[in-house]
Amino acid sequence: MSGLGPDGRGWDPKAVEYDLGEAGPGKSIVIEITRSVMVRVLDDENYRRYKAGEEPMAFQGRLHASPYRFPLPKEDRWHVVIEPNTYSGIAEFRVRVLDDAAISGQARFVR
């Protein structure tokens, strides 16, 4: 069932998708969470694979604490997919693209 997500957008509580637009080296995706969530960070080609039901190549995993910082390795259109349902309720989260200089030392690196 669809409803409003933590950021006020319409969403499916099984998977919230963010289209972050074009970004590359010198920028990072920063994800802040209130509970453990499953996350996928995908470039545009792999996002299309994900949407087609194919296996994408992406960072995929459960984030347990925040903030997490994903330095962008190449210029591309970037997407984040979050599964907000947890064993103890629905997580709240925030996803942003920031300049690396603005966040130096403030977030965990994920590689």
Image (tube, rainbow, N blue to C red):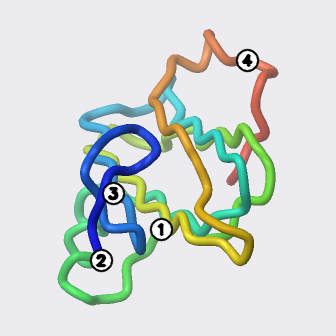
As helix, strand or loop, the secondary structure at mark 2 comes to: helix
Whether residue 59 is visible here, answered yes or no, is no
The first of marks 3 and 2 along the sequence is: 3
Query: Could you tell me how far apart the alpha carbons at marks 1 and 4 are, in whole angstroms?
Result: 24 Å
Task: Please give the residue where the numbered disc 1 appears in the rendered image.
Answer: 58
Q: Nearer the viewer, residue 84 or 62?
A: 84
Disc 1 marks a residue whose amino acid type is Ala
Task: Please name which of the two marks, 1 or 2, marks the residue nearer to the observer.
Answer: 2
Task: Please give the residue where the numbered disc 3 appears in the rendered image.
Answer: 17
Dot 4 and dot 2 residues touching (CB under 8 Å): no
As helix, strand or loop, the secondary structure at mark 1 comes to: loop
> Which of the labelled discs sits on residue 39, or is there none?
none
Query: Could you tell me how far apart the alpha carbons at marks 3 and 4 are, in whole angstroms?
Result: 26 Å
Dot 1 and dot 2 residues touching (CB under 8 Å): yes
Query: Would you place residue 24 above or below residue 39 in this image?
Result: above
Task: Please give the residue where the numbered disc 2 appears in the rendered image.
Answer: 50
Number of labels in the image equals 4
Query: Would you place residue 85 above or below residue 22 in this image?
Result: below
